[in-house]
Image: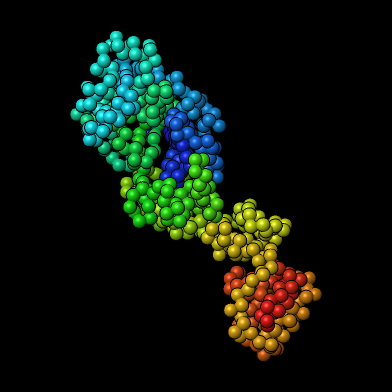
Amino acid sequence: MKDKVRVRFAPSPTGGLHIGGVRTILFNYLFAKHHHGEFILRIEDTDQTRFVEGAEEYIYNCLNWCGIKPDESSRDGGAYGPYRQSERKATYRQYAEQLVKAGHAYYAFDTAEELESKRQVIENFRYDHSSRKHLRNSLTIPHEAVESLIKEGAPHVIRIKMPEDQHISFTDMIRGDISFNSSEVDDKVLLKADGMPTYHLAVVVDDYLMKISHVFRGEEWLPSSPVHLLLWKYFGWEQEMPQWAHLPLILKPDGNGKLSKRDGERFGFPVYPINWVDAKTGKRAEGFVETGFLPEGFINMLAMLGWNDGTDQELFSMDELIEKFSLERIHKAGAKFDYEKAKWYNGEWIKRSSAQHLLPYVKQVLNHKNINTPHDDYLLKVIEMVKERCVLLTDFYDQASFFFTAPDKWDTNAVKPKWSAEKEAFFLAFADAIKDKNQLESTATESLFKELAAEKGLKVGEVMLPLRIMLVGGKFGPQVFDIVSQLGANEVVYRINNAVEVFKD
């Protein structure tokens, strides 16, 4: 372990942040904080053709909701900035030219049309150790001609010169020893014609200059490792190279392949942390926030996709995750995404959260449904009464809206078949008995209700369900006399009288 742990997440602002990316952020963050290190957010905006307006803002919003604050970033500053690659453009050419001079890279002048024509006639064409001898680059063009082309401003890229038939190895912190044959890797572009670096060059240069100690990234980046390993070697930075950990994929629920951004619509669950609107199509994808997830439930769920602490414990706060996180407990195999399990985590976090903590979230849910909540004390009591019944924050509307708005529909099918004049008289008498009471204490009101039922010759079970449906509209909600107590005498009397008219019709 290096003296100072410095990790980074380097997203491209080319679209919404998928939950796979958020889990990579989380594992970076947990590892850094466990070792009292630093977490850096670096924006890799080198591909200007795919840049999406608002994507960088979205990344920061997602981190903010998750409760993850970078120690260094384009917003937070730091000693190793700038933290947007587009602002470091001049740096990359310097390093790319250094590789050319050392014989580890070369200028390639082939046009896109020329390369496409090769693909048309050569099956599985690659720009590599065998094909580069027959293409337009500084390995086949005389030195004077190359210099002339560059002076004239001829469009060109710089490619790494991959060696032939060399074994390139490293030790992954999760997967152990991994080896590649260099002949199986093509000569990747390091510097594009517009002067911007590709990911391969930028990630190595930036990790070196920012003194990154450990790199967590998805296993889909494993095939790029030989290029990155050679760049660290060619620059003479092998001793400073970070340790790498390639994380397991988050798989589709059926286990068949990596969970993609398109799978949300297909399977009917969110794959983005927050609502994402595609700038090109205008298509909206609902996020975990809008679906009704607490950040605590979301983070807990993500942490358990490919990691556990070796015990049966499933619920972890962020502080507990930081304390217990270890590389040894990250799985090598992919983790199936289970939306029902994700909801379970969220429901458990709703249950263990205080009403005060839930208050702003529930207010937002109810206000979104045009329910104006009264003073906070009233709403806090309601939250406490119904939170055990909620899996998503949006459930608070279904489980609690009747506390604020009298029902205008009732489950009459559950009442009418057994409704009678005797029951009507009983409920009118009960309403009359409580109408002048300033406060309806739950236990005392229940006793009054039962005594009155006995006087009228009715079984309590016969009138308890109708009372609930009168107050709520259906067969749900917390203990019925807790509802009575919360609503108060005037509201309970009003609802009973309304429902009686409907039930006798």
* Residue appearing at x 64%, y 63% in the figure: 401
x%, y% of residue 419? 64, 84
Place of residue 302 in the rendered image (x, y in percent of width and height, measured from the top left) = 44, 49
Rendered view: 48 above or below 25: above
Q: In which quarter of the image is the N terminus?
A: top left
Check the image and report above or below for 291 versus 38. Answer: below
Residue drawn at x 27%, y 23% is 161
Nearest to the observer: residue 395 or residue 64:
395
The quarter of the picture where residue 378 lies is bottom right
Q: Residue furthest right?
A: 436
Q: In which quarter of the image is residue 468?
A: bottom right
Q: Can residue 45 be seen in this view?
A: yes
For image coordinates 22% across by 22% down, the residue present is: 133
Residue at the outermost bottom position? 457
Reply above or below: 229 against 339.
Answer: above
Q: In this view, does 370 lie to the left or right of 29?
A: right
In the picture shown, does residue 267 fall above or below 280? below
Relative to 355, is 438 on the left or the right?
right
Q: Which of 236 and 288 is in front in this view?
A: 288
Horizontal and vertical percent position of residue 210: 44, 27
The residue positioned 73% from the left and 77% from the top of the image is: 497
Query: Number of labelled discs?
Result: 0
Can you give x and y, in whole percent of width and height, for residue 430 in the image?
73, 80
Answer left or right for 341 relative to 60.
Answer: left
